[in-house]
Image: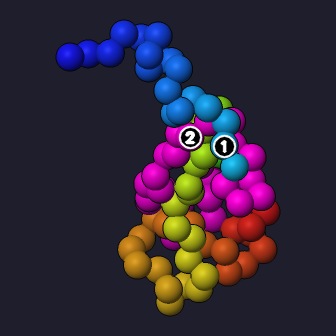
């Protein structure tokens, strides 16, 4: 049987909580999804910022993996953090 919307709205899903020292507005978490849209240089593009900004008010976002070296890339198109251009 389906619950009425009032019961869903009152669930703990929308209640504030803490994750260690981090205060969260709700208990919604978006799992990481690899976008594979960074250039061959591993520099994230404007679309990365837009993608995460569009989802930022929904809850906690766990972002995609970032490579710590060119040799550590599991597959093409993933962002890196091994040089200044990637971190800016």
How crowded is the residue under tag 2: few (<14 C-alpha within 10 Å), some, or many (20+)? some
Residue 50 in sight: no
Q: Is residue 60 above or below residue 10?
A: below
Q: Is residue 8 found left or right of 29 in the rendered image?
A: left
Question: Quarter of the image holding residue 47?
Answer: top right
Give the residue drawn at x 57%, y 70%.
66
Magenta highlight range: 19-48
Mark 2 vs mark 1, CA separation in Å: 7 Å
Q: Is residue 49 found left or right of 38 in the rendered image?
A: right
Percent across and percent down for residue 37 are 48, 56
Question: Where does label 1 land, which residue?
Answer: 17
Q: Is residue 72 above or below residue 77?
A: below
Question: Quarter of the image holding residue 76?
Answer: bottom left
- The disc, 2 or 1, on the residue closer to the chain's N-terminal end is 1
The answer to whether residue 25 is magenta is yes
Question: Where does label 2 land, which residue?
Answer: 27
Q: Are discs 2 and 1 less than 8 Å apart at CB? A: yes
């Amino acid at each position: 049987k389906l619950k009425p919307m009032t019961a869903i709205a009152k669930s703990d899903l929308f209640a504030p909580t803490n994750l260690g020292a981090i205060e969260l507005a709700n208990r919604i978490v978006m799992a990481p999804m690899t976008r594979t849209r960074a250039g061959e240089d591993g520099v994230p593009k404007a679309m990365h910022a837009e993608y995460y900004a569009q989802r930022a008010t929904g809850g906690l976002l766990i972002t995609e993996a970032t490579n710590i070296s060119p040799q550590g890339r599991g597959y093409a198109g993933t962002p890196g953090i091994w040089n200044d251009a990637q971190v800016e």
